Image (cartoon, grey):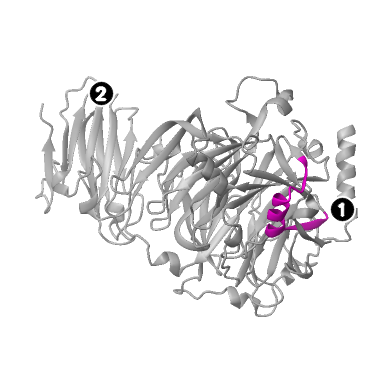
Amino acid sequence: MKFRTTIALASVALATALPFGSCKPKSNASAVGGDAAQKAYVAPGKHDEFYNFVSGGFSGQMSVYGLPSGRLLRVIPVFSVDPEKGYGYSEETKGMLTTSHGFTPWDDLHHTQISQTNGETDGRWVFANGNNTPRVARIDLKTFRTAEIIELPNSAGNHSSPYLTENTEYVVAGTRFSVPTDNPDVPINTYKENFKGTISFIGIDKNSGNMDIAFQLQTPGVNFDLASAGKGPSHGWFFFSCYNSEKANTLLEVNASQRDKDFVMAVNWKKAEEYIKAGKGVKKQVKYAHNIYDEKTHSTKSEIRTEVLSLDPTVLKDICYMIPCPKSPHGIDVDPTGEYMVGSGKLAALIPVFSYQKMIKAIEGKQYDGEYDGIPIIKYEAALYGEVPKPGLGPLHTQFDGKGNAYTSFFVSSEVVKWNIKDLKVLDRVPTYYSIGHLMIPGGDSRKPNAKYLVAYNKITKDRYLPTGPELSQSAQIFDISGEKMQLILDFPTIGEPHYAQAIAAEKVSKNSTKIYKIEENEHPRVAKGEGETKVVREGNKVHVYATAIRSHFSPDNIEGIRLGDEVYFHVTNLEQDWDVPHGFAVKGAANAELLIMPGETSTLKWVPDRVGIFPIYCTDFCSALHQEMQGYVRVSPANSNVPLAWSMGTNNGSNTASKAPAGGSTGKAKK
């Protein structure tokens, strides 16, 4: 009861401390007025200006929308199995979901981040974090496919991730949940003694994009929330917001809200690099998975790694510094000039803006206010540029327009507030429906924002769309920010729970899009590069079907001699060399999903028949006028059957219907 009373008092205090109420319109029908909606209209056949990569939250996927139309272009499977594309079901993609816990078919994808060059988005890759089983994924924007996933050892929850340095040197990942190092069996109430945080710096190969954990920092046992890289003059630094400086281990809504200020942790990663080169890193034995999808073999290479380098900032004192930040900070965002760091204390009644130059002077002058677990605490006033007074209720995240203005989302008062970075004055505010979380301006966290649109990603949509039972879709709202005042022009439903998102000019991505995989470059070990190479091979109780698909038939399309107890592997190569002609493949009664095979690609479906009989196979993706005819049969005989293994295509053996096989038709029979 005491806790409940405390919570109630805290809520009332927050609600009454500020003279703001929600500024929602009285009627949602009046949200878009006049000809505003025309600004979001993209005529049929016309393309959008931007790709918008939006996290799917608990869906574990990433969705891609066009802006400003809000058209859904694609859902990219990342951390969760996806029956639509066979991701996590095909033998080639199962390895992408390998972790130290084994096959892990789900995660909670929170944030997206587009690769940068010289501080500008470059359209090569987009990164995403798995929050539940700590992982970072890299999506290749030539194929819009997940190309790589790396697991994070010594981490429990991966929320402040994946944030990039301005030349994509590193992607960082801070643990949301501090845990004991090596996760031994200790009482939970020894949190203050035994629990530690970890931040991982993952190096990115500038050519291939391949990831490798360069080093980790062992930190105090706080909860890391979000992060932002320095840029320009502050390049070489990273900033992490952290809450629970109280080190509570129960009922954090009360016990982690005791202090007026928590911290932003400033990390000098250039200095950390120097220590690594000087041999100051300590090797730690760990276990984590690293998975890469090879576009040549169309397969995943997965390995378990066992070692990382770790640095201790309590010993190497000039790597990390704590900056007090009111209160329970969520977002920390660095402006395009690299000079200002905006904190967003979600229980604070103001927005603190820190100065990079003042922070450096404070460090040089040792303007400290003691230490926090061995990390120097910079005096709040020594690093503070100023405070935005009375901006709203519940600030979360800030984006920038590159014109000296910042836009902050406010969860409690459900609004976006525009304010000037220099004089810290509020310039405009607009309502959102309802309870905005993240917000996004294309390039809004880079050195060169494209400040035409702002998108709000909202948590709740009561009364916005047709009812869909107890759960309603979450939403995005697009605002035109080209003028002095923000103007709502469109809202649209989203997939899963949208968190952070990024957008990039379409021309930076679309020109590099892969249209086909060249069949002559297919290095899959079980590829059939033409119908003449199709065959069926028995290896003990494993049967490998080397099959092809082309409009509008499979080769072979009749297979006999499969026995109950066999494991059947259909290695299907799509022979098409034409853009946007994938083929699907499915077997009646298969206990997994389909395959969806791109032109020139080979993909494998494992099938274990559970009964004797005739089983149809068929294409699942409409491919031509005769798509429905793209089918075949597999005969499964008893386990002790002597039916020989045989396959054919284009041969009818009915008593009255024997016909000539069409060109390319073939028959085959396994050698005994």
Residue 456 sits above or below residue 459 on the image = below
Mark 1: secondary structure? helix
Q: Quadrant of the C terminus?
A: top left
Cα distance between the residues tagged 1 and 2? 72 Å
Horizontally, residue 70 falls left or right of residue 327, namely left
Closer-to-camera residue (461/465)? 461
Q: Position of residue 356 (x, y in %)?
A: 68, 58
Badge 1 crowding class, 10 Å Cα cut-off, few under 14, some 14 to 19, many 20 or more, is some
Nearer the N terminus, badge 1 or badge 2? 1
SS of the residue under disc 2: loop
350 drawn magenta:
yes
Which percent across, then down, holds residue 663?
Answer: 11, 54
Which x, y percent locates residue 365?
73, 51
Q: Which residues are magenta?
A: 349-370
Residue at mark 2: 638
Q: Is residue 429 left or right of residue 57?
A: right
Nearest to the observer: residue 391 or residue 310 = 310
Give residue 607's quadrant in the image: top left
Name the amino acid type tagged 2: Pro
In the image, residue 497 sits, relative to residue 222, either above or below, namely below
Vertical comparison of 427 with 312: above or below: below
To which residue does mark 1 refer? 15
State which quarter of the image contains the N terminus. top right
- Residue 462 visible in rendering: no
Residue neighbourhood size for the residue with mark 2, other residues' Cα within 10 Å, grouped as few (<14), some (14–19), many (≥20) = some
Residue 180 is inside the magenta segment: no
